[in-house]
Image (cartoon, rainbow, N blue to C red):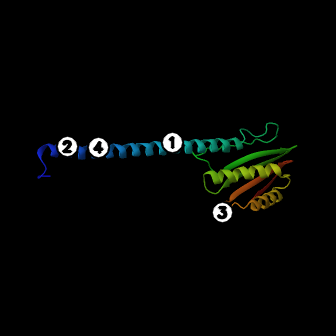
Amino acid sequence: LSFIPHPLKSYTAFLIYFIITFFSIYKLVLFKNKQEQEKKELEAHKKELEQARDFQLSLIPDNPPSDIKYEINGYMKTSMEVGGDYYDYFKDGDTVFVACGDATGHGLNAGMMVSITKAGLYGLQLNEPEKSLMQLNKAIKAIDLGKMRMSLNIVKFENSKVSLSSA
């Protein structure tokens, strides 16, 4: 730029500074927009996980049936996300069934497995824990959940007798 007359040097420098400033501001605006979009997506994801967690907790009974002759207590402390823990009570006359299980992993897949298991248990004629687990296993396998698994225990309390089966 030494061969350019003095006023042109000033204009050229000003133009270069202007271009650098313009592109810097442009890049900063793009960066801020990207950060804002990522923040919105993270908030939406957190909200979805919270809704899924609330749904999972709604699957767990607050208390056992009140009109039974057994003292049964249940408590579950969940993590911040959806998990695969599950328990429930079923009453048929004087017979009480208690189911307790844990799906593999955490997250929405584990929550889905719990939902399917609960629906399956409500659709079964609970009679003997072993037979009930075999029927439930057959129904869940028909859905083909890939590598999702769940350990499940069913206890039957009837006439001072306890029957237990695990799968």
Q: Nearer the viewer, residue 71 or 66?
A: 66
Q: Position of residue 63 (x, y in %)?
A: 73, 38
Q: Residue at the location (13% across, 50% down)?
A: 4
Reading the chain from its start, which is encountered first: label 3 or label 2?
Answer: 2
Residue density around tag 4, few if under 14, some if 14–19, many if 20 or more, within 10 Å = few
Q: Type of residue at label 1?
A: Lys
Which residue position holds label 1? 40
Residue density around tag 3, few if under 14, some if 14–19, many if 20 or more, within 10 Å = few
Which residue position holds label 2? 11
Residue density around tag 1, few if under 14, some if 14–19, many if 20 or more, within 10 Å = few
Q: Residue at the location (67% across, 43% down)?
A: 55
Reading the chain from its start, which is encountered first: label 4 or label 3?
Answer: 4
Do labels 4 and 3 touch, CB within 8 Å? no
Q: Residue 103 falls in which quadrant of the image?
A: bottom right
Q: Residue 78 falls in which quadrant of the image?
A: top right
Q: Type of residue at label 4?
A: Thr
CA distance for labels 3 and 1: 32 Å
Which residue position holds label 4? 21
Q: Comparing marks 1 and 2, which lies closer to the viewer? A: 2
Q: Position of residue 140 (x, y in %)?
A: 75, 58
Q: Type of residue at label 3?
A: Lys
Reading the chain from its start, which is encountered first: label 1 or label 4?
Answer: 4
CA distance for labels 3 and 2: 68 Å
